Amino acid sequence: MKGTTAHKTTCCYCGVGCGVVVHKTRHGHISVEGDPDHPSSKGMLCSKGRNLHYTVMDTTDRLLYPLMRRNRQAPLQRVTWDTALERAAAVFKTFIEKYGPDSVGFYASGQCLTEEYYVVNKLIKGFIGSNNLDTNSRLCMSSAVVGYKMALGEDSVPCSYEDIELADCFLIAGSNPAWNHPIVFRRMEAHKAANPRVKFIVVDPRRTDTARMADLHLQIKPGTDVVLLNAIAKGLISRGYIDEHFIKNHTEGFDTYRLQVSERDMRDAAKICGISLHDIHQAVEYIGKSKGFISMWAMGFNQSVIGVNKNLALLNLHLITGHIGKAGSGPFSLTGQPNAMGGREVGGLSNLLPAHRNLADPAHRQEVADFWGVPALNPKPGLTATEMFEALKDGRMKAIWIMCTNPLVSLPNAHLIEEALKAAKFVVVQDVSNRSDTVAYADLVLPAAAWGEKTGTMTNSERRVSYLSQFNEPVGEALPDSEIIVKFAHKMGFGHAFNYRNASEIYDEHVRLTKGTNVDISGLSHERLRTQGTLQWPVPTAESNGTPRLFADHQFYTPSHKAQIKTIPDGNQSEPLSDDFPLVLTTGRIRDQWHTMTKTGRVNKLNQHIPKAFLEINPADAHERGIKEGDIVTIQNPRGQVQVPAKITEDIRQGVVFLPMHWGKIIQSTAARANNITSDLVDPYSKEPDFKYAAVEVKKF
Ligand code: SF4
């Protein structure tokens, strides 16, 4: 249409990373449609993506100006950017001087753009001298990261969405892609519809929409995943469904593993998992007879006190069958957030350095220090997400800078987070929306530019780097997150190392740091991504068209170049159930909402799907407690309680209850906040919280 401009960009919600075309009229009216040229999504958008324009056009909740309070009792008042950032720098400098660099930290988000991650990572690790940068990717993918590193040598997702159409067996574990990664699931559905021999095996204590599509639904007891996967491995080995040539030439650790998995009787395994022996055998047959086997998993695996073990047990199935590094096969973690992978590329976790370098490696530290022009990096790992809030509560940390995330709703054991924010001496909240519950605890509120108001890049679940274009000016005085951090770096006295004119220059610096690594993107720039479209890393040269599949040569990133088959214990380490708290609480997402609903909760169409929080409970558990459909129930344990209406359904296993994780104080009330009662136990390796297993009791309110 005359006067309308079209802008190609990427959806800002989940890790599918769908391509979006934004149309903007000369009067500023915005509409969106799927980008038919985007290889990940091929023109499709889910309900959240299709309604992105509403979140752009309605700016009523936006933070428009920096706000500051002089003390905790005083109200937030409008100040200039100079005043805000000078105060922040003065406070940070005081704490660093008095208590050392580890007294401050940044808590960022998998929704940050790669450039934003890069500058905040460089600021704290290179110049402030602490590694206290963690992100909400810790709550999302960190168990997968550790699993990949231990088994394959590096945090590298081997396959691509194009493998979906080449596979004939899918094991979907701890994931409901029909709701949470809808466009990936549409591709899987279409593939199955065209090829009815394709098998779906779904592992989930709930009968989700994904499970309804399954040829085999293994409705296991929570926490028994490793027992199940080891039993499947035993079946694959005993029936000769393994690739001995691959095991011999490209893996290490098989003999010990075989011994371990052979020890448990299959009947015992079935009993522990709460499913039939026949179903385990059926899974073995489906996987064993497949030509292309893909496993997909998400938070049901990662958000666990044994999240790394679950990941390793799943990766082992690929390593013993040789289903990795070839068309239509591979382990495929479904990233929750749009740019959790980009964050990992720049080293945006407290134990990582840029381009998948390890903080623990002195040579890697020196490489990065030399590149940034500083003498050395602090070797001490920084605090992880939950550790930072514990440190704020007990006074080891004094100040926290929270970017683009709402920890008061999203972190486990919310009352502890509340106490931590109250105890903190200085809290900066840098966000788009005043609907973030965390804003109420801020001493300084910094307005950030939203999707469409800035440029940058993101990497989706299949290692595909996409460019996000700007089609709107930031509202009020909001600034892009990277610009805010760069301005702050200048106020801290590090301006000489933060002289960027735009996000493109930040990206170029990040790209230079990847040269020669396994995540080499030397062939990428904003200009190339903008004009030529998306590419999958590694992209080592300007001539390279990216790498759809890793490990095609079966050379893994371990020192021996062999993949590691890990022998792992199969027990769960979650908090025990008891007579007082006999039910397992698991949490998760609903189809049309995103995280803590600060964006999607403003869209009427999306709120119509499921307007209020609820508790899913099995009829037998409800009957035992005298609970009827729609009754308000209290779900409680020693950490707190939640009150929501009951939804009685056979879709959930007896002994398990489910709460959606989206609702918080601003959106509904703290009574609906699932994280009032979630467990803050964490996986010992990944430090990812055990969101999917808390001991609770349910009573009629
Ligand atoms: Fe956005 Fe994910 Fe939906 Fe695609 S599937 S439109 S990336 S929310």
Image: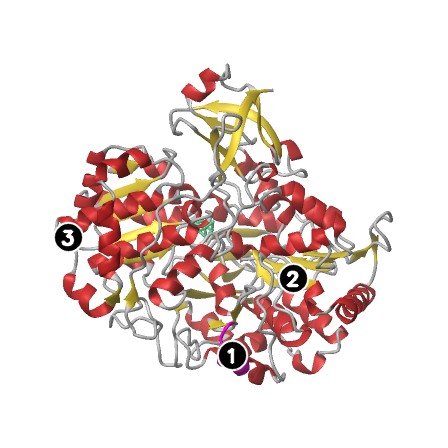
First-in-chain label (1 vs 2): 2
- 10 Å crowding of disc 1: few (<14), some (14-19), many (20+): few
- What range of the chain is rendered magenta? 360-366
Q: Quadrant of the C terminus?
A: top right
Which residue bears the numbered disc 2? 106
Please give the label number shown on residue 241.
3
* In the foreground, 226 or 37: 226
Q: CA distance from mark 3 to mark 1?
A: 42 Å
**Which residue corresponds to the image point at 43% horizontal and 60% vertical from the top-left?**
145
First-in-chain label (3 vs 2): 2
Instruction: Determine the image quadrant of residue 19.
Output: bottom left
Q: Is residue 364 magenta?
A: yes
Q: Position of residue 306 (x, y in %)?
A: 43, 49
Q: Amino acid at mark 1?
A: Pro
Left or right of residue 445: residue 327: left
Please give the label number shown on residue 362.
1
Q: Is residue 661 magenta?
A: no
Instruction: Determine the image quadrant of residue 329.
Output: bottom left
Left or right of residue 393: residue 197: left
**Which residue corresponds to the image point at 51% horizontal and 62% vertical from the top-left?**
7
Left or right of residue 416: residue 7: left
Q: Position of residue 554 (x, y in %)?
A: 25, 70
Q: Amino acid at mark 2?
A: Phe
Secondary structure under tag 2 reads: strand
